Amino acid sequence: MSDAVEAQGGPTGFAGEPQVQKIMLVTDAWAPQVNGVVRTLARLVDELRAMGREVEVISPGDGYRTVPLVTYSEIRLALGARGDIEERFTAFAPDAVHIATEGPLGWDARAVCLKHDFPFTTCYHTQFPEYVNARFPFIPLAAGYGVLRAFHDKSDRVLVSLPSIKTLLEARGFHNTAAWARGVDIERFSPGFRGKDGGVYRDLPKPIFVCVGRVAVEKNLEAFLDLDLPGTKVIVGDGPARGALEARYPDAVFTGAKFGEDLARHYADADVFVFPSLTETWGGVAIEAMASGLPVAGFDAPGPRDLIPGHGVGAVNDDLRQACLDALGCDRKICRAYAEQFSWRRCAEAFLLNLEPLPRPKKKRFWRRLRALRRFRPWRGPLAA
């Protein structure tokens, strides 16, 4: 069993019933944004609610004033939300608070928790220092990691999805990391879609090497598109770099973003999934590919390094072309069986076990005090400490 599967809660699954019933989840990444973080959090919330947990989600779409993120205009950042977060925190009275992202909402929620000495957990979803450095090389990695350390340093646990990311963060001075692997929808992504109606790539030269995800500079797509491979290279997804890459690589096929069954078919009908990114913190698209029976090729980097070697589900190599060719020979049934270990239920159970609630005796006194303060104060706005 892989380290990533162990991080979901181990082979025996859920160990006991936790006391956490009410969870406040604060995230700067939420619909209508389309990315791996949003998909992960949305599915986690669905699973937690199906398990009978009450989840209050605070996101940029809750009526806050927002501004576009630089270089990602479709991502809106919420400003001036601290007072409202404090109101909702007091009214909801959660057992635990999880701050999923390091954006403005995350910083505001962190401030509220620290003000009232309420424990919270955070998550490391994205290698922002590398992303920022890729766009603005004059901003050193050390500066980015300094900001992230400051954000996560008061968190009881920083949830990370891969052993290699845990090692990287600890080398950067993070001291409170905990393993939490993600899940995959094994019903939505299935080998059963392969060849339906002749397949989505029926008119393209075979084999099909596909990459699915956001078309952006940090995804290192040129490393894939530059390869001399037989058949056809396909990019499924959209993003700010799509236009420039389409112009530079006219022999590649760019399908745009796909969803639902259409996306599942684009996975299942391909022959190898190529994962050129060097900055992943999980690799959800790789697990979706495996669930579709699709072997994965990648660099020896976080994500592929943690998920592929030793399982017969693909190949990693500093020579990406060789990894692609090696992956062609993998057994698609083994890929599917491996992905089936990553259930969303196991992911949600491990998440619950990683939360840090107030101890029961302290919790009752804590909320009694805050509710009394809220009841008698004659104004709206942040509560007095």
Image (tube, grey):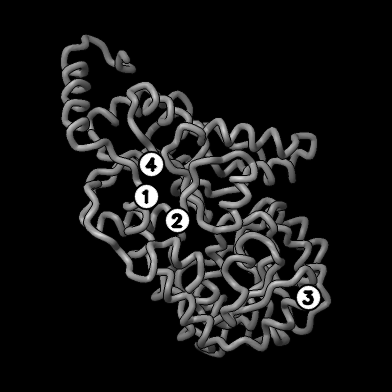
Residue furthest toward the top? 378
How far apart are the alpha carbons under marks 2 and 4? 13 Å
Residue drawn 21% across and 30% down? Answer: 362
How far apart are the alpha carbons under marks 3 and 1? 39 Å
Query: Does any portion of residue 236 appear in the rendered image?
Result: no
Between 220 and 174, which is closer to the camera in this rendering? 174
Pair 3/1: label in front: 1
Q: Which residue is mark 1?
A: 354
Q: Which residue is mark 3?
A: 321
Contact (Cβ within 8 Å) of mark 4 with mark 1: no
Q: Earlier in the sequence, mark 2 or mark 4?
A: 4
Residue drawn 83% across and 76% down? Answer: 228
Q: Earlier in the sequence, mark 4 or mark 1?
A: 4
Q: Earlier in the sequence, mark 1 or mark 2?
A: 2
| Amino acid found under the numbered disc labelled 1 | Asn
How far apart are the alpha carbons under marks 1 and 2? 8 Å
Between 14 and 369, which is closer to the camera in this rendering? 14
Mark number for residue 180?
A: 2
| Amino acid found under the numbered disc labelled 3 | Arg
Contact (Cβ within 8 Å) of mark 1 with mark 2: yes
* Residue 309 screen position, x and y as percent: 62, 74
Q: Earlier in the sequence, mark 2 or mark 3?
A: 2
Q: Earlier in the sequence, mark 3 or mark 1?
A: 3
How far apart are the alpha carbons under marks 4 and 1? 10 Å
Quadrant the C terminus occupies: top left
Pair 2/4: label in front: 2
Residue drawn 48% across and 30% down? Answer: 107
Residue drawn 67% across and 77% down? Answer: 315
Q: Which residue is mark 4?
A: 98
